[in-house]
Amino acid sequence: MDELIPPPMASLEAALKSRLSYLLRNNEARIRDLRTLATPGFKRTFDLAPALLHHNHPDLPGYLSDPQTPHGLVFYDVWLKNNPFPDPRPFSDPYLDRKPDFLAVECLVLIGSSGSVGHTSRSDLDYWVCYNPDRFTENGLRLFREKLAAITRWAMEENHTEANFYPIDLAVLGQGRLNSLSEERDGEVAPMLLIEELFRTILHVAGRHPLWCVWPPEKTPEEYKETAKILAPLAWEKEPPFFVDLGFPAKPRPQEYLASAMWLTCKSEHDPFKGLLKIMPIMEAVETEFQSPLLCEIVRDKVFSAKNEELPVDPYTVTVDRVIDFVSRRLSPKLLDLAREAAVLKVLGRSSDHLDARNQGPTNPKTRALNRWREEWAWPPGKLERLRDYDNWTNAEKSAEAQELIKLLFSCYMIIANHLMTNFPGQVDAQNEVLAPMAARMLGRLGGAEVTVELLPSHILRENLSKRFLFRRETSGWTVYAWPEELEDEGDIVPSDAIYQTARAAKAAAWLVSNQLYGPETKVRLSALDTDFLSLERLNEYLEKLAELFPPIKFHTLNPQTIWQAQAQGPVLLTFNFEEPVEGRIIRSLDVIYRTGWGETRHQHKDVSSLTVEADKLFLLSELLHESCGISSSEPLVFLPGPQPLMSRVFTNLMGAINVRFRSKSQSQGQSFTKSLIDL
């Protein structure tokens, strides 16, 4: 290989290898932090992953019996020398299989929070397994994916660690694109966002070294491309080239900045703390007309200027510092404090994370970062301790904090979108085929209408709740309480356990299902005071029907033809007298649950107890279904029978009324309606 490199390029290669020493020392420091913060299972997965990719042996995890299974890791011997196993016997000759026909993995890197203070007990290992597609047959690539999936299963089953191995096509990546990484098509929606995150958080594990990570900032992208052709070619025959081309991170086009902001706003439902910190750099880039440097460039430059005592250069703390500086110049002091809290809460994670950080002293990377921020931000005594105690906040306090973050996130998105649409009117489209499902998800989360069945502002809140809930009728309506596992008696539940309040039990039940809090393991109880109006059996029957009719939505599968329809799309669940006393065939009320085209769950309620004529009640209810839900036929209506047998006859009357009303326009509404009634 060396004799093919012209002298000027050989000189540049030597300079790049010299710069690599700075990268390696930072890499080593980050791996030390990874081991400090990781669980034993996380560490074991990290320690063995390269070996499992290199070998395909029946006694090793990830084994596939097909002899054509691609495996093998470039520079595996170098990795093995620097990472000796505590017990080397399982990986020593002659135990191992034959030498691979070809080395399938060119480069193995981690992306995300691994090796940073952003690592928490929720963190996973996100590996990018980079390969040359020209070396793979179609069957070989299928087997390769199966092997990666087998290692993922081993990590979860044996080590209780989520480890994702994403096969990355180097030919596609070199063009600034990504093959799809998940069913939500994140690689298609915002590839430059993910590529920038790769280079900002990259932790080299094994294989060829990414060329861009040692690229001098004063050299141009054009020079990079020429160098990559010679020093980091995709195809090679004899000795592997030392460097690999993972592409050159570039600033996205206006449309992709919009897509990235929308994507982050949607993804923030999983972690609003992280979402806020990710959307702020996009807002800064847009408001500075794309003149601000990419975060990955800032991190890289810091690595080459850092002194030993300043290592590691943590990509997460660099991001936080940049965000806080921008927010301090752009937003109010109140929002600045909110952004600081989001950063700290992301670092703290669950109680197990920050208790470990507090107990391990100043050498712990989380402790180092938190102490520095507390001093720089001049926080009063007790502020950090209160955030450390986040797990013990009331549900109302957690929800209020998350709601404020969501509001700020949506505000940032609107600022970004308005700026881009104003300055690049012909280049951005927030409702194209790719972005429409995300816009629909955002609209569903925003809700805002009185009839909206609200969503929790964060999945973190959902995950922290037990699987037991109490429905209690109170003066203002119904309150749903989370019933902690340690409490046996209903009387031990306190007001801070309340998680939702609304006027109708039907809406409270729909809220439980819409937020995916109801499932096979869920136990629901009714307060004893409420059994005269609503039985537990009736409530559970209703919850089961809701779960059947309104399963979780996959937003990218929404119908593009009806995605912006506010009227009911799909089934409409009707229930008469859901929480009213049982009194024969008298209609007192109707509860209606349905979904809009963008997936928002809605609840309508009509009280008709003031009317005395049953036909008048049905006429009023048919108007509700038509005007509010857009129902013009009985086809989507689903009726939940109750303890009053004659309510089935009432439902039949209502369906007939709707069908006749919209079939016969020549007759007056009152006449056609009356003729459709079955004699009660």
Image: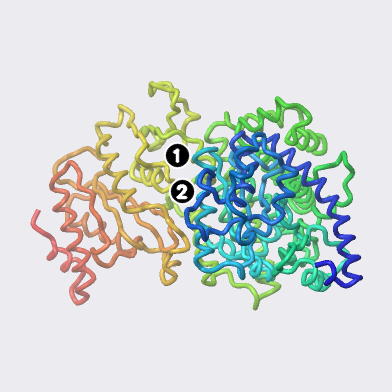
Residue beneath the point at 45% across and 39% down? 500
Q: Position of residue 163 (x, y in %)?
A: 57, 47
Query: Residue most toward the front?
Result: 94
Q: Are marks 2 and 1 in contact (CB under 8 Å)?
A: yes
- 232 in relation to 45, above or below: below
**Residue at numbered disc 2:** 454
- Mark found first going from the N terminus, 2 or 1: 2
Q: Position of residue 35 (x, y in %)?
A: 69, 37
Residue beneath the point at 54% across and 72% down? 432
- 622 in relation to 97, above or below: below
Q: Using the rendered view, name the quadrant where residue 296 is placed.
A: bottom right
Q: Secondary structure at mark 1?
A: strand
The answer to which of 311 and 466 lies nearer the viewer is 311
Amino acid, disc 1: Tyr
The answer to which of 260 and 119 lies nearer the viewer is 119
**Residue 182 appears in the rendering:** no
Cα distance in 3D space between marks 2 and 1 = 9 Å
The answer to which of 465 and 34 lies nearer the viewer is 34
Amino acid, disc 2: Glu
**Residue at numbered disc 1:** 500
Relative horizontal placement of residue 59, taking residue 551 as reference (left or right): right
- 265 in relation to 493, above or below: below
Q: Using the rendered view, name the quadrant where residue 517 is placed.
A: top left
Relative horizontal placement of residue 468, taking residue 592 as reference (left or right): right
Decide: few, some or many residues near mark 1? Use Cα within 10 Å; few <14, some 14-19, many ≥20. some
Relative horizontal placement of residue 677, taking residue 516 as reference (left or right): left
